Each structure stands twice: as structure tokens, then as C-alpha cells.
């Protein structure tokens, strides 16, 4: 594990408490709409957003920027203000990751909040109120679920792998018989958290994931002993001018290397 700058780690720790508190309350707000019939709009004609997303986003923005007024703000449900690029640190937020599943009554959605500096996540929290789970992590401090340290699991004879079928189909033939293909999970952040917690082994991430989908979960996965990699074998960077990503692979060890090899062979 790379050496952690203790000054940065201490400063990140100061951000964890407000992140956790705000994410918890945003989860309470979202739960008021869960299983109900909230008003829904379509973004770009294909992606739903609901009044629950807007309510949670408004609370998070007001609360977090009141606590850290000098931080930038990047959220799925807020028009991007490029002024954030001049901030030293930026909140990266998805008020409800997995909105489509949320609206369909699936419980595996979460509030995702992170603090990013110089492209790297310094503190990350996933609040998953429908399943009573809270994940968080700080650099060099480990990853936690409801206060208990978590870690990726060792690879067994069979592997639980999630992600788009066309990418799983590209895995080497010798691996195909070892795979249990996991049904679609609407929340990408929760999918990464399941790997961190040892429930899944790996996942592909199709192109065009955005910073708010993965910034918090990336740190949680890394601190649990896994990694999220792009087609060049590098960790994503966040809160820059470009806020979306190509295909990604998440997991650990030998299996992650196999997934990373698949996306390395993709065009573009």
C-alpha cells in the first residue's frame, strides 16, 4: 500500500463526520419517497430523475457547502459550475445512486458523497438506508460497513461477477465455467461496495460512468484491498474538466487482472 501523507489523512478525517451526517439525513429524506409515487422527469430522454433526487441533492448541497464553503460542488442533479475547478477540494455527490432501481422498489440504492482533492478521493461515504448499511473510508485507514472493517474476499473456485453481459462474454474461455453471473444491480456504487464487503468478486463498468457514480465507492473498494482500473490499468481521477470515464474493471488479485485485460482490448 502506498505511503499516506498523514497531514492529508488528518484533514480528510475532519471531512468524514460532516459527510456521514449529511449522507444519513439525505437517506432519511430519500426514504420518505421510497415505495411511494414521486414525480419523475426524464433527463436526455432516457435517464429518470425524481423529486426524491432533487430533495436529497438540495439538502446535501446546502448542508455540506455551509460546513465547507470553500469547497467545489459536483453533483449529478446540479448544473455543473466550472468555478469548482479553482477549488482545492470538491464535494462529489450522487443524491440517489440507482434512481431507476429506487423507483422500481429495489433496495440496493445509496446516497454517495465524497471529497476529492487533486483528482483523488480523500473521504467517501455510501449511505444505503433501505438495507440499513453505511460504508465509509479514508486513505490509509481502511474501509468500514456499519462500523466494522471490511475486506475483499479471496478468490474461490467460482467467482461472482457482475456487469454488462457483452463484457463478461469477452472473458477468457477458461474463466467462463468458473463464473456466476450476477443479475443487474442498478446502483454502480453499491455494486462496488459489495465487492469491498466480500459479497461479490468483481464487476465490469460500462463506458460513461460519471464521477458521482464512483468517487466514494472507489476509495471504499481500494481501502478494502481491491481496485477500480481503467483500460490503461490506472485508477480514475475525479472532479477535473472531464467527469465521465471509459470502461472500467473492479475487483482484486488475479480476477481483476483478467477483467482489466478484457477492457484493455476494447477499441477507443
Image (cartoon, rainbow, N blue to C red):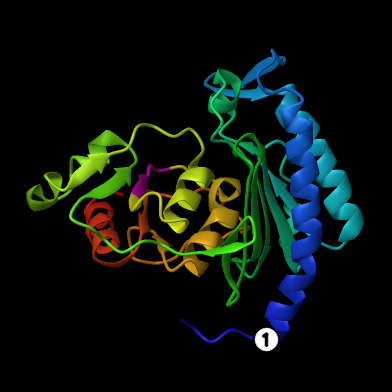
Tell me, yes or no, if residue 135 can be seen here: yes
Q: Where is residue 23 in the image (x, y as percent from the top left)?
A: 74, 47
Looking at the image, which is closer to me, 6 or 208? 6
The image position of residue 122, as x and y in percent, is: 65, 68
Q: Does the magenta stretch include residue 204?
A: yes
Left or right of residue 168: residue 132: right
Residue in the picture at 26% in, 55% down: 259
Asked if residue 161 is positioned above or below residue 164 in the image, the reply reads below
**In the image, residue 136 lies at what x, y percent?**
63, 59
What's the residue at 12%, 51% (across, down)?
172
Q: Is residue 75 magenta?
A: no
Dot 1 crowding, Cα within 10 Å, few <14, some 14–19, many 20+: few
Q: Name the residue under label 1.
A: 6
Residue at the right extreme of this rendering: 66
Query: Is 249 on the left or on the right of 14, as rendered?
Result: left
Residue occupying the point 76% across, 56% down: 19
Q: Is residue 267 visible?
A: no
Q: Give the residues drawn in magenta, as a range.
A: 203-207
Compared across the picture, whether 189 is left or right of 57 comes to left
Q: Percent position (x, y) of residue 250?
A: 38, 55
Amino acid at each position: 500500500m502506498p505511503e499516506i501523507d498523514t497531514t492529508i489523512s488528518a484533514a480528510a478525517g475532519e471531512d468524514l463526520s460532516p459527510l456521514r451526517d449529511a449522507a444519513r439525513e439525505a437517506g432519511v429524506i430519500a426514504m420518505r419517497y421510497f415505495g411511494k409515487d414521486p414525480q419523475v422527469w426524464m433527463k436526455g430522454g432516457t435517464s429518470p430523475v425524481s423529486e426524491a433526487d432533487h430533495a436529497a441533492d438540495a439538502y446535501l448541497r446546502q448542508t455540506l457547502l455551509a460546513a465547507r464553503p470553500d469547497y467545489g460542488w459536483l453533483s449529478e442533479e446540479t448544473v455543473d459550475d466550472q468555478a469548482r475547478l479553482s477549488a482545492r477540494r470538491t464535494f462529489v455527490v450522487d443524491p440517489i445512486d440507482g434512481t431507476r432501481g429506487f423507483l422500481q422498489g429495489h433496495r440496493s440504492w445509496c446516497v454517495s458523497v465524497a471529497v476529492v482533492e487533486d483528482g483523488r478521493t480523500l473521504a467517501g461515504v455510501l449511505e444505503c438506508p433501505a438495507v440499513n448499511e453505511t460504508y465509509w473510508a479514508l486513505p490509509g485507514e481502511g474501509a468500514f460497513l456499519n462500523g466494522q472493517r471490511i475486506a475483499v474476499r479471496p478468490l474461490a473456485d467460482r467467482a461472482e461477477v457482475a456487469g454488462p453481459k457483452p463484457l463478461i462474454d469477452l472473458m477468457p474461455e477458461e474463466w467462463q465455467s468458473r463464473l456466476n453471473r450476477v443479475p443487474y444491480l442498478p446502483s454502480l456504487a453499491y455494486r462496488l461496495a459489495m465487492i469491498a464487503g466480500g459479497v461479490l468478486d468483481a464487476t465490469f463498468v460500462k463506458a460513461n460512468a460519471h464521477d458521482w457514480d464512483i468517487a466514494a465507492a472507489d476509495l471504499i473498494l481500494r481501502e478494502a484491498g481491491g481496485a477500480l482500473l481503467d483500460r490503461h490499468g490506472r485508477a480514475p481521477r475525479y472532479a477535473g474538466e472531464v467527469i465521465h470515464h471509459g470502461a472500467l474493471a473492479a475487483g482484486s488479485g488475479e480476477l481483476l487482472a483478467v477483467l482489466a485485460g478484457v477492457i484493455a482490448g476494447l477499441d477507443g
